[in-house]
Image (tube, grey):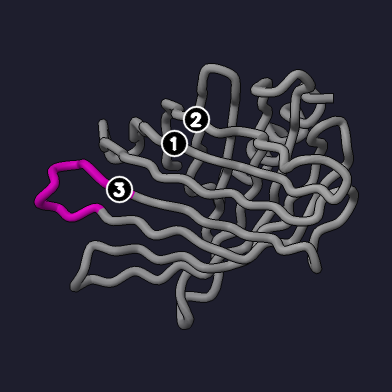
Amino acid sequence: MFFRLVSLFFVFAIATTAQAEMLRIGLGSDMFRIDYASANLGKSIGQIEFEAGLLYSEQNSTSDTIGQIGALVRGESVEAPVIVSVGIRAYFGTASSESVGGLAIGGEVSLAPESWNGFGLSGILYFAPSVVSYGEAKGLQDYGLMATFKVTNQAKVNLGYQVMKVDFDTQPTRTVDDGPYIGVSILF
């Protein structure tokens, strides 16, 4: 199942590389995460970014696979080196051998001043309360912090810490991932 999802993800990414903006891959001691984002339309209100991603984790006794698709509106300021993105994500997959999902709201904030010589910081936060969760999930949280270093104009190295949790009615909260990771971001 995991390899089918990864294959489908790569087919999607390759089919749209003409519009691609970023491919980010992160590896931890017991997890793999891949995210793809494509910037499109909407310059008058901010840049609209479509994204897809997949998290595979073996942190627990049963492996968990959570996919996501979403849309964000990104605002950039010339005066300040801050990029703020807000939007929605739909999560779907399996956790604790149960089908889970939810519609989350949230966003990302990135800070990368030129005076930092290629260093940057960013954080993400997404939250799906029980009213918009489905399957066996009664809530979902996805958040993290990341430090980046620009190697070239098209590649960055990432060091981060991420947490993804799924709440259930009938069992304790499942921590799908909770730990550090290292990764790369490739800009097209």
Question: Tag 1: residue type?
Answer: Tyr
Dot 3: what SS? strand
Residue named by callout 3: 121
* Residue linked to disc 2: 179
Q: Earlier in the sequence, mark 1 or mark 3?
A: 3
x and y percentages locating residue 101 in the rendered image: 80, 51
Nearest the eye: 3 or 172:
172
* SS assignment at label 2: strand
Q: Are marks 1 and 3 in contact (CB under 8 Å)?
A: no
Q: CA distance from mark 1 to mark 3?
A: 12 Å
Kindly identify the residue that appears in the image at 52 percent across and 68 percent down.
86
Say which residue appears at 39% left-offset and 60% top-offset.
109
Q: Where does the magenta region start and end?
A: 112-121
Number of numbered tags placed on the structure image? 3
Q: Is residue 118 above or below residue 107?
A: above
Which quadrant is the C terminus positioned in? top left
Q: Residue lying at the far left in this picture: please name it.
A: 115
Viewer-proximal residue, 138 or 15? Answer: 138
Residue pointed to by mark 1: 161
Q: Nearer the viewer, mark 2 or mark 3?
A: 2
Q: Residue furthest bottom?
A: 44
Which x, y percent locates residue 119? Answer: 22, 42
Q: Secondary structure at mark 1?
A: strand
Q: Quadrant of residue 126?
A: bottom right
Q: Earlier in the sequence, mark 2 or mark 3?
A: 3
Q: Which mark is residue 99?
A: none
Amino acid type for the residue under numbered disc 3: Leu
Relative vertical location of residue 67 with respect to residue 59 in this rendering, above or below? below
